[in-house]
Amino acid sequence: MEFWVIQTFNGLSYGALLFLLASGLSLIFGVMRIVNLAHGSYFLLGGYVGLSVVWRTGSFALAMLAGGLAVALIGVGMERLFLRRLQKQELAQVLMTMGFALIFQDLALLIWGGDPYSIPTPAWLTGSLRAGELVFPRYRLFVIAVAAAIALVLWLFLERTRAGAVIRAAVDDEEMARGVGINVAAVSMGVFALGAFLAALGGVVGGGFIGVYPGSDFEILPYAFVVVIVGGLGSLEGAIVGSLLVGLLDNFGKALFPELSYFTLFAPMAVILALRPTGLFGRA
Amino acid sequence: MPGAARRGGWVVAGLGTAAVLLAAAPLFLSSYPLTLLTQALIYAIFAMSLDILLGYTGLPSLGHAAYFGVGAYAVAILATEFRAGFWTCLVAAVAAAILAGALFGPLAIRAVGTYFLMITLALGMLVWGLAFRWVSVTKGDNGISGLERPTLGPWSFADPTAFYFLSLVTFVVSAACLVVVVRSPFGMSLMGIRESEARMRSLGYNVWLHKYLAFMLAAAFAGVAGFLWAYYNGFVSPVEVQLVTSVEALLMVALGGSGTLVGPALGAGLIVFLKNFVSVYTKRWLLILGGVYICVILFAPGGIIGALKRRPR
């Protein structure tokens, strides 16, 4: 019993972290149909910027904000200067974003070195809560809370505001959106900034429990892709359900069948794809 | 058309010169450049196999390293655990790669465009996950080492020159097979699918079956490349099947010019040499490779062959 509760909790907290990464990736996908291999790099860079900010200022909240904003700027630069001209050229987008991913990886190595770091978390988030025999680390509860708050804000934004409606229109049918006078180029830029911001936020938050280290970019990227594939492109519900599912599958896979842990993650994904090629919540 | 004939003549002359140079290379190259050339030939087979999917069928696979890796692992496991010989390993590597392609193909070719990219990426990661975690079979992150170069009848390929010739012969045979395929009616149909899937379907072609066969064909030759690589490197690890390797193969195809077979072979050679030479002089090799990716897309979207074709004579 204890095993199941704790593993479920760990899976949920990892899923919460994945949601930060995948929600942005899914939106970018939805609007621009870009396979962005540099999305994991936003996570990595966000973590490193956050680390430097915590070292300088000691403020974790500031680190989250600074990491997010700095990387959002990088994302906007990439979108405006390089990716915009490659619309509907999937291969070119893949190679271009891969180029950026390699450059970011090497720059991070150059600036922050190859040692793994952990971002120091505020005192009120260390330690754990006890419920009888069960122990819940506070920081992981915090990660779940952050993801839930972001999910709520995103949902309100997408469903209840005019800007959100514009984004949904661009996801559903870009051509029609253009036709009714929506500035899809501006929407793309905004969505790219938002996606990069969320991924970097995930990097800072993740830095507190999985750490910041070279290679984390390409380690987490496939997970984000699986979430998006399982959930469906451009769907917030899909990103939520997909993240939790992937977090749980990954965690139980690692705990129960360590030798086949990635298989237990990717095989169900293949089954879902075979049954529903557009993902659980995606539309064709 | 005299223009086309003249160009055809140039192509034949170019290929002939390349063949002579490759055959004579051991006479004037020392052992280090020769091993690099061997590596280039192996990657050329790999890149050409991807070109069947990407260039001829219009399916950009983001997980092609999986089949390369399956072939390499098949050799590594059979040769170290079971002391299997040359032919057993070759057949097993190709069969394993085809089997993986046969399993993954139906999932992947349901999709086109962005979805195809993502599904092949995820399937590639599945193989990577097995290589990384299934420690009892693949030895996980440590990889499988201690592979010895094979012998075949009276020949031993332990010597770098002998192994170079093995790679060269395999390369030539593979290239010849692929050229025959793309010039056959089957190859023409693949190009038809690349240009317009709907039209081919309405003409009565079984598009699904064509894509499926192309997928398995590409997997088979990736397996051949993996077979050589395992012996060449003497060591097989999850690096062989990771995403970065798959994307690198895409870069080789794009750099040379997709849909030409010659281009990807050329692209593979360039990347292999660039990688090995630059990494001697600087630690910032990844930075430069990243720059190469971006420059290819910005300045040579049709690859080297595309740039040559566009230039007026």
Image (cartoon, coloured by chain):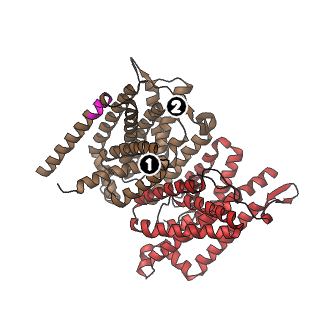
Residue B182 screen position, x and y as percent: 29, 45
In the displayed image of the protein, which residue is found farthest to the top? B154
Q: In the rendered image, which residue does mark 2 sit on?
A: B76
Q: In the rendered image, which residue does mark 1 sit on?
A: B248
Check the image and report above or below for A85 versus B106: below
Q: Does any portion of residue A235 appear in the rendered image? A: no
Which residue is found at the position 47% from the left and 23% from the top? B85
**Labels 1, 2: front one:** 1
Q: Nearer the viewer, residue A211 or B48?
A: A211
Residue B62 screen position, x and y as percent: 46, 51
Identify the image quadrant of the C terminus of chain B.
bottom left
Image quadrant assignment for residue A23: bottom right
Q: Residues within 10 Å of mark 1 (few under 14, many from 20)?
A: many
Q: Which chain is brown?
A: B
Say whether mark 2 and mark 1 are on the same chain. Answer: yes
Left or right, residue B226 beside residue A226: left
For marks 1 and 2 on the same chain, the one whose residue lies earlier in the sequence = 2
Residue A103 screen position, x and y as percent: 49, 56
Range of magenta residues: B21-26
**Magenta stretch encompasses residue B260:** no
Colour in which chain A is drawn? red
Q: Are marks 1 and 2 in contact (CB under 8 Å)?
A: no
Report the Cα–Cα distance between label 1 and label 2. 22 Å
Q: Amino acid at mark 1?
A: Glu
Q: Amino acid at mark 2?
A: Ala
Q: Mark 2, chain letter?
A: B
